[in-house]
């Protein structure tokens, strides 16, 4: 299901219809992206701790709802708090179906897998992109 393409192929094919995740994007994409980290953190703090995991989809949807369609966002690190026990890629993919956007990944891509943080840390995550309806652009 998931796919990875290099930037040159992405630009020439103009692949659409999937959540696009940029790994080390072009500077122009980086400059045009919108940081949503503080907005997410503020909304999360306003939510009761025992409800945060269950409300995360609504929080992300609300954050994105005020932004234009097909915007590129960055700084989603707050979502990776291990207390939430979320499948972040599944969350991002689900919200994309309601509101098209793309994201700049805060981690690495290698051998068909996206990683966040470093192995051994509580917030470390590893995702096989073949399990998701996403397009990784490196």
Image (cartoon, grey):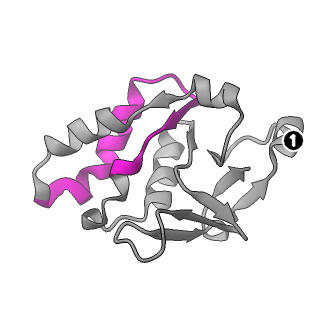
Spot occupied by residue 57 in the image (x, y as percentages of width and height): 34, 49
> Which residue is at 30% across, 59% downward?
81
Spot occupied by residue 116 in the image (x, y as percentages of width and height): 50, 61
Front residue (pair 11, 2): 11
Residue 104 lies in quadrant:
top right
Spot occupied by residue 46 in the image (x, y as percentages of width and height): 13, 40
Q: Does residue 47 appear left or right of residue 57 in this picture? A: left
Q: Does residue 4 appear left or right of residue 66 in this picture? A: right
Q: Does residue 12 appear left or right of residue 104 in this picture? A: right
What kind of element bears circle 1? helix
Q: Residues within 10 Å of mark 1 (few under 14, many from 20)?
A: few
Front residue (pair 9, 95): 9
Q: Residue furthest bottom?
A: 120
Spot occupied by residue 37 in the image (x, y as percentages of width and height): 36, 38
> Which residue is at 37% across, 58% downward?
80
Q: Main secondary structure of the magenta part?
A: helix
Image quarter hosting the N terminus = bottom right
Q: Which residues are magenta?
A: 50-78
Residue 107 lies in quadrant:
bottom right
Q: Which residue lies under the disc numbered 1?
A: 8
């Amino acid at each position: 299901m998931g796919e990875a393409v290099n930037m040159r192929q992405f630009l020439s094919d103009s692949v659409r219809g999937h959540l696009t995740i940029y790994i080390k994007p072009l500077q122009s994409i980086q400059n045009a992206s919108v940081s949503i980290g503080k907005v997410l953190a503020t909304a999360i703090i306003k939510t009761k701790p025992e409800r945060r995991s269950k409300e995360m989809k609504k929080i992300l949807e609300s954050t994105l709802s005020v932004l234009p369609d097909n915007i590129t966002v960055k700084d989603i690190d707050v979502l990776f708090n291990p207390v939430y026990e979320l499948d972040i890629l599944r969350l991002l993919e689900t919200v994309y179906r309601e509101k098209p956007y793309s994201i700049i990944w805060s981690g690495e891509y290698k051998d068909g897998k996206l990683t966040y943080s470093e192995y051994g840390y509580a917030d470390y995550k590893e995702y096989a992109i073949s399990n998701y309806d996403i397009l990784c652009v490196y």
